[in-house]
Image: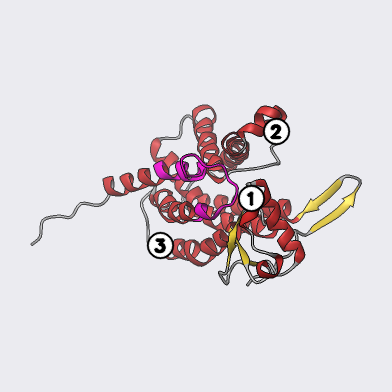
Amino acid sequence: MIPYFPQPEVHLFGPITVHAFGAIVALSVIVGWRMTVARARTKGLDPELFQDLLLYVVLSGFVAAHLYSVLAYFPRQAVEDPLLLLRFWEDISSFGGFAGGLLGLWLFFRFKARDVDAAGRLLSLDVIAYVFPFAWAIGRIACTVAHDHPGTITAFPLGISLKSPEAQAYIASFYREAGRLAELPPPAELAKKAFHDLGWYEFLYMACLMVPAFLVLDRKPRPPGFFLIAFPLFYVPARFFLDFLRIGDARYFGLTPGQYAGIPVFLAALYFTVKHRPSRGPDR
């Protein structure tokens, strides 16, 4: 099993401490930004205009990711402490970020670049969708080192080991918060087990499957919108099933907000796949 280690951090001065999570997320944004601008240039898009587009997408994405996370996963805490909605550096949601990114795109093309036609807008979306798995993989390293998406205990070899007392205390805090502390075995038995780390699993999925698949698919010319459809077809099923392993996430009729958000996204991707599938000519 994978050894448990606490999130690395570096204290700078006073109240300022740099956590590994924030540093790696910043790295993922920088890498994704540079890759996207470079790809936009190869696709004949204006790189300067695309930089402005990315600013809208990133800012809107982070704001919506936080708001969706708080309102969908922590509604009671939001009622008790409304200022939680303004602490944008806390609690972010993947699907909230996706929706916010799309909102940023709409705002940009609605108010900043109204002269860009539908084909140019679709191509811009496709450029971002292609790069997303690369940046997302780096972002999930941040989740891995922070262990901020813990799942249930397991004997799975790729789980995070619960051998150390520190790891046991960490996972017990999540079970306690979820009201499931009685489900944990005694410490001696727990030390032989692990917990599912969903950020770690997503990193493996991205790095070992999605990124190689996108690199292979990009070897041939693809129509605009191809990777925009491919991303949810690859990502949503994996995310949907991983969410069943979460410990204390809010659930509504048995499903998490992420699962509910993923269903229409995946169905829309299937619809556009079928609708735009090339028709075959008559057999000869």
Q: Nearer the viewer, mark 2 or mark 3?
A: 2
Q: Residue at x 66, y 31 (%)?
A: 78
Height in image: 111 above or below 133?
A: above
Residues tagged 1 and 2 counted as in contact (Cβ below 8 A): no
Q: Please give the residue where the numbered disc 1 appears in the rendered image.
A: 29
**Who is closer to the viewer here, 97 or 101?**
97
Q: Residue at x 62, y 40 (%)?
A: 62
> Is any part of residue 191 visible from this angle?
yes
- The image's mark for residue 59 is none
Q: Please give the residue where the numbered disc 2 appears in the rendered image.
A: 84
| Structural distance between the alpha carbons of marks 1 and 2 | 24 Å
Q: Nearer the viewer, mark 1 or mark 2?
A: 2
Identity of the amino acid at label 1?
Val
* Residue 66 rendering spot, x and y as whole percentages: 63, 38
Residues tagged 2 and 3 counted as in contact (Cβ below 8 A): no
Element type where label 1 sits in the image: helix
Judge from the rendering whether residue 75 lies leftward or rightward of residue 280; answer left or right: right
**Who is closer to the viewer here, 158 or 208?**
158
Among the two numbered marks 2 and 3 on one chain, the one whose residue lies closer to the N terminus: 2
| Structural distance between the alpha carbons of marks 1 and 3 | 23 Å
Q: Residues within 10 Å of mark 1 (few under 14, many from 20)?
A: some
Element type where label 2 sits in the image: helix
* Residue 203 rendering spot, x and y as whole percentages: 57, 61
| Structural distance between the alpha carbons of marks 2 and 3 | 42 Å
Q: Please give the residue where the numbered disc 3 appears in the rendered image.
A: 217
Q: What is the residue that sits farthest to the right in this orientation?
A: 14
Question: What is the magenta range?
Answer: 242-264
Identity of the amino acid at label 2?
Leu
Residue 83 covered by magenta stretch: no
Among the two numbered marks 1 and 3 on one chain, the one whose residue lies closer to the N terminus: 1
Q: Residues within 10 Å of mark 2 (few under 14, many from 20)?
A: some
Residue 254 covered by magenta stretch: yes
